[in-house]
Image (tube, rainbow, N blue to C red):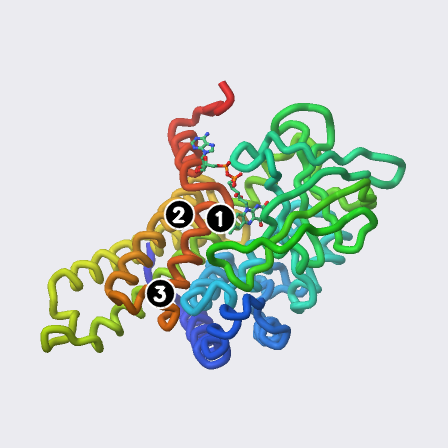
Amino acid sequence: MDFQLNEEQKMLKKMVHDLGEKEFRPKVAEWEAKAEPISHEHVKKLADLGLLGLCLPTKYGGQGRSAFEAILAIEELARISILCAAPVFESNVGPVKVIEQFGTDEQKQKYIPPVCRGESMISVGMTEPEAGSALTDLTTRAVLDGDYYVVNGMKRFVSGGGESDVYVVYVRLTEQKGAKGIGGLIIEKGMPGFSFGKQEQFMGFRGFPSSDLIFDNCRVPKENLVVKEGEFRKLMLAFDLERCGNATMCLGIAQGALEEAMAYSQQRKQWGKDICEFQAIQFMLADMALRVEAARLLIYRATVNAATGLPVPLEANLAKCFANQMVREVTGMALQVHGGYGYSKEYPVERMMRDGWGWGVAGGTIEIQKITIASLLLRRRFDQRR
Ligand SMILES: Cc1cc2nc3c(=O)[nH]c(=O)nc-3n(C[C@H](O)[C@H](O)[C@H](O)COP(=O)(O)OP(=O)(O)OC[C@H]3O[C@@H](n4cnc5c(N)ncnc54)[C@H](O)[C@@H]3O)c2cc1C
């Protein structure tokens, strides 16, 4: 076991760090205030440096590097803001991975290269108004009619909704109940019968588009089926890598919050001395560092073991669940170290706290993650319906 980054990984981390500090940090406050996604020019910069599709195969325009290296890049950018990390997240550990792992060669040729060039973004539509944690209750139906699937239903809270060009949509392909009838269809923006709801106004994630997807007799070519019925497990296996990305967003935010708290505690004076000289502040800084480092180790283990493929489910779920709780605690402490200024929009820690909270809901709530972890530990399934 080696806890050191190799030379290439150190270079990658430094390159992303410098890019983030120089090109992205000066823009973050403006994007946040206007609730705007990062500019196309910035996405292009990420693409030109090979950060989009870093862990996708070179055959399809990616860099052929490991999932861990993509995670290193996401972490560095999420330190600054989740908006900066979002394109790297989506293009490496997002639903594009379902296509890369389980798609046909035609699907890979069509959908992966534009993602690596920063010209297309792929989102995932799983959640429905009546099927959140109980995902396998989903009712969006796809019925084969000649050469097309006819899709009817609605998806909720889809990150990238309205903005992304392509959606991997979980649909019910047969009348079978539960996971058995569920598969995945690739649906493109502009296909007849596909529209979007209004943009969500979340507590955090400002500039991260999110909307309902609405399918009204939407016609999707049958060759767009990426995961057939009975293979729901494949969708979940690929989603475990997305969960590592979710955990890494938390890690980056928390690392950023720790850095802010360290700096502030050494510049703010009360009672005639730097507040870092008070033991209460030292304990908070130490507690933050403890949590950040523990999350980092869980995430690195899960993604190093994934190599260029998918992670072990237990390792991915442990990493996500821990990081989701950790970021709420760490950003809360960072805010407290800042006193009243932390509660003000003049300082970034309040944004970090708002952004950090959402990841423990997105991609499966903390509670559902714990049920999954217990189930994987005990090798037993716990039916929540009975
Ligand atoms: C920022 C953000 C981004 C998102 N991005 C996407 C996306 O890109 N694509 C997508 O499809 N979805 C997305 N979602 C939706 C997300 O996956 C769901 O919100 C989540 O799975 C929870 O579903 P729900 O909101 O319906 O809550 P519910 O399932 O109604 O849960 C409500 C509460 O009940 C608890 N609960 C439910 N069942 C149990 C149980 N059996 N045991 C114990 N507690 C339980 C939950 O933990 C939660 O606390 C996103 C959500 C957010 C907030």
Q: What kind of element bears circle 3?
A: helix
Residue where numbered disc 3 is placed: 349
Image vertical order of residue 59 relative to residue 303, above or below? below
Residue where numbered disc 1 is placed: 243
The residue nearer to you, when weighing 356 against 85, is 356
Question: Do labels 1 and 3 touch, CB within 8 Å?
Answer: no
The residue nearer to you, when weighing 50 against 155, is 155
Q: What kind of element bears circle 1?
A: helix
Question: Marks 1 and 2, Cα distance to the nearest angstrom?
Answer: 8 Å
| Residue situated furthest right in the rendering | 146
Question: Do labels 1 and 2 touch, CB within 8 Å?
Answer: yes
Q: Which amino acid does label 3 sit on?
A: Val
The residue nearer to you, when weighing 340 against 357, is 340
The N terminus sits in image quarter: bottom left
Residue where numbered disc 2 is placed: 319
Question: Marks 3 and 2, Cα distance to the nearest angstrom?
Answer: 23 Å
| Residue situated furthest top in the rendering | 386
Image vertical order of residue 382 relative to residue 78, above or below? above
Residue at image coords 77%, 52%: 106
Q: Which amino acid does label 2 sit on?
A: Ala
Can residue 93 be seen in this snapshot? yes
The residue nearer to you, when weighing 280 against 16, is 280
Task: Classify residue 41 by image quadrant.
Answer: bottom right
Say which label, 1 or 2, has the lower sequence index: 1
Question: Marks 1 and 3, Cα distance to the nearest angstrom?
Answer: 24 Å
What x and y, as percent, mark residue 199? 62, 55
Task: Classify residue 176 by image quadrant.
Answer: top right
| Residue situated furthest bottom in the rendering | 22
